[in-house]
């Protein structure tokens, strides 16, 4: 997880309390840079998409397939 900015790590841990981050990817989109971080909390796998400014875009739980976040992907 080295190389991931502290504000991205903080945003992920705020979005999913107790998450233990395992993987991160950087994606360049037409709207800017998006970090996709994965981790585990309470036995569930999560993927959190975070804008470079630390704004959480989407939280996905692989166990229940529910999404939450400020923006939806369409």
Image (cartoon, grey):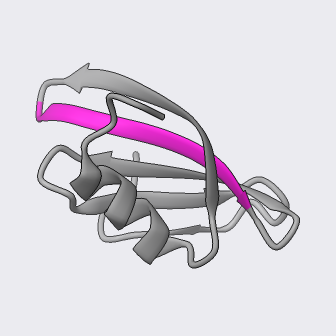
Q: Is residue 12 left or right of residue 28?
A: right
- Residue 11 on image: x %, y %: 34, 64
19 relative to 37, above or below: below
- Residue 9 on image: x %, y %: 38, 54
Which residues are drawn in magenta? Answer: 31-40
Query: Furthest residue to the top?
Result: 28
- Residue 21 on image: x %, y %: 59, 49
User: Residue at horizontal 33%, vertical 36%?
Assistant: 4
Q: Is residue 34 magenta?
A: yes
Q: Quadrant of residue 65?
A: bottom right
Q: Is residue 2 magenta?
A: no
In this view, the residue in front, 62 or 16, is 16
Q: Quadrant of residue 27?
A: top left
User: Residue at horizontal 34%, vertical 25%?
Assistant: 26
User: Residue at horizontal 30%, vertical 70%?
Assistant: 70
Q: Is residue 22 left or right of residue 56?
A: right
Q: Is residue 20 left or right of residue 59?
A: right
41 relative to 52, above or below: below
């Amino acid at each position: 997880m080295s190389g991931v900015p502290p504000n991205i790590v903080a945003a992920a841990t705020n979005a999913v309390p107790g998450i233990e981050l395992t993987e991160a990817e950087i994606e360049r989109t037409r709207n800017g840079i998006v970090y996709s971080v994965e981790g585990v909390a309470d036995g569930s796998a999560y993927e959190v998409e975070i804008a470079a400014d630390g704004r959480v875009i989407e939280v996905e739980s692989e166990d229940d397939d529910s999404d939450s976040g400020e923006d939806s992907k369409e």
